[in-house]
Amino acid sequence: MQNAKAEIPQALISPAIQIYLPTMVIEWLIFLWIFLGLKRGGEDLKSIGWKSLTFKNLLIGLAFLGFANLVLSGLGSLFHISVTKEVKYLLPKTALDKLFWVLMSLTAAVCEETGFRGYVLTKLNSFVKNWWMTALVSSLFFGLGHFYQGWGGTILTGIYGLLFCLLFIWRKSLIPGVFAHFLQDAVAIFY
């Protein structure tokens, strides 16, 4: 039994295969579920914010990323929250892992922004009629979805989610948030 791990090709025990690929499949299935639900209701992705792919929105996404990282770094320092050790095992090591990491970063950006900001905010707000309440609910679930980062990471990610909600409410477009989310996740391969 001890040699069983030695017999398994390294590519099959990498994070790319064990974590990244299943995560991407699940997130794209959720995206598909949202898409089909919208279509069934006579709507399309534009109705939940997939619009305004402009250079201005990309620049706003980049500026948002810088601002949000300053806020989160400040809060992390102030409250002594670090999530590095909790997520270290997730970081890519091989070239294959890095390729899948970038693909997973794109998947997370598109699918999580579509779900948590686009769908949850617009649909829940159509019932609640209170952007603050819907933003808090969306952010709570976004944070809890990152519980693997420990309590500190969950709290910081929930705050990050709230900032993304405010960006979406302001711009009425998912584009700045998707761009910022992708960059945030993808650059992790460099540190």
Image (cartoon, rainbow, N blue to C red):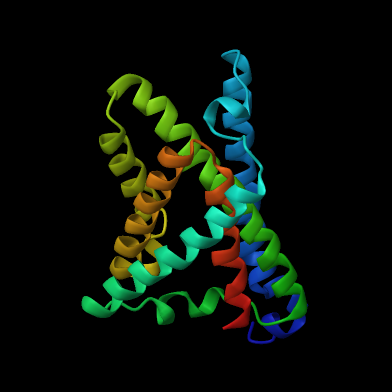
Asked whether residue 8 appears in the rendered view, the answer is: no
Give the vertical position of 137 relative to 156 (above or below): above
Asked whether residue 101 appears in the rendered view, the answer is: yes
**Image spot of residue 104 (x, y percent):** 64, 59
Give the vertical position of 73 relative to 62 (above or below): below
Q: Residue furthest front?
A: 56
The residue drawn where x is 69% and y is 86% is: 3
**Image spot of residue 93 (x, y percent):** 66, 82
Give the vertical position of 173 relative to 125 (above or below): below
The residue drawn where x is 41% and y is 53% is: 145
Locate the C terminus by quadrant: bottom right
**Image spot of residue 169 (x, y percent):** 41, 38
Locate the N terminus by quadrant: bottom right
User: Is residue 120 or residue 87 the one in the foreground?
Assistant: 120
User: Is residue 109 or residue 152 the one in the foreground?
Assistant: 109
State the image quarter where residue 51 is shown.
top right
The residue drawn where x is 64% and y is 43% is: 28
The residue drawn where x is 70% and y is 74% is: 98
**Image spot of residue 62 (x, y percent):** 55, 61
The total number of labels drawn is 0
State the image quarter where residue 170 is shown.
top left
Lateral position of residue 42 relative to residue 4, left or right: left
